[in-house]
Amino acid sequence: MTKERLSAYVTLIATVTLTLILLSMVGVLLVGLFVDKVDNTKIFEAITPAFQTIVGGFIGLITGIKIGSENS
């Protein structure tokens, strides 16, 4: 497997994983917003840091892969 192909494969896997995580988090958020037993302010307190961490980590990973593949 060439370095370019490996870079594309890892980028694809990271992008698909990020998409699935974000869709599941948005789904949970939407369900939580419409359930009367759940306090909406608590949902945002719990999800916001996790959401930012996951998005930031994956964007950093994808950017690092792209920069590394361009430098080689």
Image: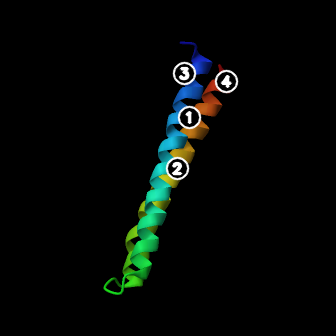
Q: Residue at x 57, y 25 (%)?
A: 7
Closer to the chain start, of discs 2 and 4, is 2
Name the residue type under label 3: Leu
Q: CA distance from mark 3 to mark 1?
A: 10 Å
Q: Which residue is mark 4?
A: 71
In the picture, measured across the screen, residue 15 lies left or right of residue 34, that is right
Q: Which residue is mark 3?
A: 6
Name the residue type under label 1: Leu
Q: Residues within 10 Å of mark 3 (few under 14, many from 20)?
A: few
Q: Are marks 2 and 4 in contact (CB under 8 Å)?
A: no
**At numbered mark 1, what does the secondary structure look like: helix, strand or loop?**
helix
**At numbered mark 4, what does the secondary structure look like: helix, strand or loop?**
helix
Closer to the chain start, of discs 1 and 4, is 1
Q: Which residue is mark 1?
A: 12
**At numbered mark 2, what does the secondary structure look like: helix, strand or loop?**
helix
Q: CA distance from mark 2 to mark 4?
A: 27 Å
Which label number is shown at residue 25? none
